[in-house]
Amino acid sequence: MTELLEIPKGIIKVDNPDHPFTFDGPDILLSDSKGLLAIFILRNNEQKNASKLFSRLTNALIAYPAHTKMLLLIDNLKSIPSSVIQMGKGYFSEFIEGKDIRKTKSLIKDKKSKEKIKEIQYVQKKIFKIQSLVQRDNLDYIRKTKFEEKDISNIYFLKEKAKYFDKINQKETSVRANIFEFKNQYFGIKRLLNNISDLTELQPFYEFVVNSEFIVDNGVPYFKDISRKVLNVNAIPSLKYDPLKPMRVASLFGWHLVNSNDFAQIENRISKFKK
Amino acid sequence: MPTPQDRINTMIALVNASPSIGPKSKKDIIIEFRQVIVVNSISPPPRKNILKVLHATRALDTTLRSFLDHHGILGRSHSIGQYLVQLTNHRLRTVVNISLSERTKYQNEIVNVRNKHLHTANSYPSNDREVYQLTGEMEALVTRII
């Protein structure tokens, strides 16, 4: 679909953008000297599970410049889940169709309000302060720890899966990934495999935080608190062309990395942040 | 998996759209970002790697300086370390600023590493991973202010 779009002259189009702070994001960027459009296209899996769409949009609202307009490109040949239509208005700046791309310049010209941009910048400042604190802690830990293959999942009292309120389906939901709640703290366990991107493997851990700790209201990604969580991994997560990215994004969502089969050591990574 | 070209294209789109960087600087920064990819074919690898660091540094340096200049808060700063101080200390409410913790992170992960290679004779990044780690953090910093 994207190759059929009629892009006006002077507009820079980027397919599959790769932002340093996103695990996933828009499908296309359209940029001119006056502003930026981030275009989302509903993917097949998002037709069944709309929360996937809202979590990558929330990540983009956190990471992209506050002035970026987030647009949902509707494909008339595909049905749109009612939850996307109902909730999408509070998340996206606009819904557009393929023919609207011809009017990119006027879409860019019609900017977000100054108040909204200021509000997003204020939220981003708070988030990135936390991100840098967690990333520095993770870098310190990685540099003095030899990560080893060990039985990281053998902690018998981590049984209760973490829950969050699914805003799309309006119900409390247990997370599918290995994220456990114990004494009001979250403990994640992930054995990273060699044949899958670490960023992809850690996506459920990022999405859990987006779903449980962020609320998007009128295009602003609000949060009360990004709680400190531990993520027990068998190896340092990495990505070939941006080695720190999986850890940078984990830090954005409050995950402190650990490599241990000793619960005292694991808990020690975040005990100082206990509420 | 995203390629280095995907990342550079993203950076170019972000810089191009920034309301805080003048047109001349935008053009120069975009040219520098493109060079990070162009030098990929150069050999031997140490020369390729030092050029990647050089072009990414120049893109970052001009982005930070143009941003501060645009908002009238450049002061007497003339290095990336000093630009980070200005970004942390300014008191303009409507302009993005970074926390002390962010400044420390970028000072450690960018400025100190980059200084080692660009100011020391016969010093080169030890491998591709070190280069990608450094340029990844530089790109992260650029996205924080544009």
Image (cartoon, coloured by chain):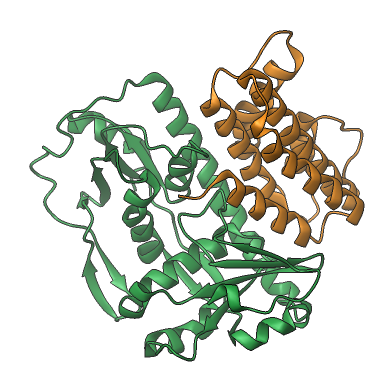
Chain colours: A green, B orange
Does A135 sit above or below residue B120?
Answer: below
Displayed quadrant of residue A38: bottom right
Residue B94 can be seen, yes or no? no
Task: Pinpoint residue A63: horizontal percent, then vertical percent.
Answer: 57, 57
Task: Pinpoint residue A249: horizontal percent, then vertical percent.
Answer: 46, 48
Residue B115 can be seen, yes or no? yes
Displayed quadrant of residue A209: bottom left
Task: Pinpoint residue A188: horizontal percent, then vertical percent.
Answer: 26, 46
Is A139 displayed left or right of B86 in the figure?
left
Give the residue at the far top of this rendering.
Answer: B121
Which residue sits at x=72%, y=53%?
B12
Does A261 sit above or below residue B13?
Answer: above
Foreground: A34 or A131? A34
Is B131 displayed left or right of A152 in the figure?
right
Which residue sits at x=36%, y=36%?
A272
Give the residue at the far left of this rendering.
Answer: A156
Is A262 displayed left or right of A41 in the figure?
left
Task: Pinpoint residue A164: horizontal percent, then vertical percent.
Answer: 28, 66
Which residue sits at x=42%, y=84%?
A84
Foreground: B3 or A141? B3
Q: How many marks?
A: 0
Displayed quadrant of residue A235: top left
Does A34 sit above or below residue A237?
Answer: below
